[in-house]
Image (cartoon, coloured by chain):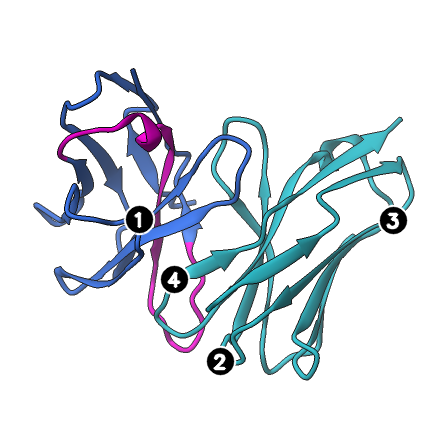
């Protein structure tokens, strides 16, 4: 069935260093890959997304890559800051359908 | 900036009682969703709704659950007879169109506690 695997489950990095979160998906029909940031007690907030016709996308300190052949996609955060501490979810979706979430990565930024 | 809103933020109920969770999606959106998140776990899809009918539902969405869009703005999730295991955060989401890409915006959630 449809599944999204996410690693690592927890990640601790020094402030200023980079953080990388990796995901794989099972449904080859998936064409949209959003990343959500969830802070304590809040709903998931879309921070960046990538579509299947693109291999890479960047928005300031955040970048996402997609390898459709391998069904891998990843999130890169550079120059991490304390406010980047949160739970990050990768997800996959196909046209007019539900979003399948990964299990989440708890990112902690050490001062 | 338009956003999805949900009420109440926290609902406490006794096992066996009915609850209705309410959502106001972004006004020009056409697709509506409910998801839930049990504490510490991933966000799970419950149901999607388009053109006044359910378009997709998960195994979780059994006969105890129903959804309704009673007017042009609200979208509700009803649980007829709550169970302890229904305790979770419930998120409403909406999207403009599939258009090949399904950008969904989430509300802040309702925390449901079943005692």
Q: From the image, state whether disc 3 or disc 4 is nearer to you.
A: 4
Find disc 2 in the rendering and name its residue.
A29
**Mark 3: secondary structure:** loop
Find disc 4 in the rendering and name its residue.
A98
**Mark 1: secondary structure:** loop
The structure residue drawn at horizontal position 13% and vertical position 34%, both measured from the top left corner, is B80
Find disc 3 in the rendering and name its residue.
A18
Asked whether the residues under the numbered discs 4 and 1 touch, taking CB atoms below 8 Å apart as contact, a structural biologist would say no
Where is residue A27 shown, x and y percent of the image?
51, 75
Q: Which chain is blue?
A: B
The structure residue drawn at horizontal position 72% and vertical position 62%, both measured from the top left corner, is A74
**The image quarter in which residue B6 lies:** top left
Q: Is residue A88 magenta?
A: no
Q: Is residue B103 magenta?
A: yes
On screen, B92 above or below A50? Answer: above
First-in-chain label (2 vs 3) = 3
Chain letter of disc 3? A
Asked whether the residues under the numbered discs 1 and 2 touch, taking CB atoms below 8 Å apart as contact, a structural biologist would say no
Asked whether the residues under the numbered discs 1 and 3 touch, taking CB atoms below 8 Å apart as contact, a structural biologist would say no
């Amino acid at each position: 069935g449809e599944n999204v695997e996410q690693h690592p489950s927890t990640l601790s990095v020094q402030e200023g260093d980079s953080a990388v979160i990796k995901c794989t998906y099972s449904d080859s029909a998936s064409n949209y890959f959003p990343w959500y940031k969830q802070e304590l007690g809040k709903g998931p907030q879309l921070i960046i997304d990538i579509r299947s016709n693109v291999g890479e996308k960047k928005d300031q300190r955040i970048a996402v890559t997609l390898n459709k052949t391998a069904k891998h996609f990843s999130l890169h955060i550079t120059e991490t800051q304390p406010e980047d501490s949160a739970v990050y979810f990768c997800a996959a979706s196909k046209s007019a359908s539900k979003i399948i979430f990964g299990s989440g990565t708890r990112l902690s930024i050490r001062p | 900036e338009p956003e999805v809103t949900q009420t109440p933020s926290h609902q406490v109920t006794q096992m066996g009682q009915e609850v209705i969770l309410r959502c106001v999606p972004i006004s020009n959106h056409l697709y509506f969703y409910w998801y839930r998140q049990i504490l510490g776990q991933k966000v799970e899809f419950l149901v999607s709704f388009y053109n006044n009918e359910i378009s997709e539902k998960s195994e979780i969405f059994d006969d105890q659950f129903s959804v309704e869009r009673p007017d042009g703005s609200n979208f509700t999730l009803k649980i007829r007879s709550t169970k302890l295991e229904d305790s979770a955060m419930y998120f409403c989401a909406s999207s403009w169109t599939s258009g090949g890409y399904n950008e969904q915006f989430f509300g802040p959630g309702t925390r449901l506690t079943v005692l």
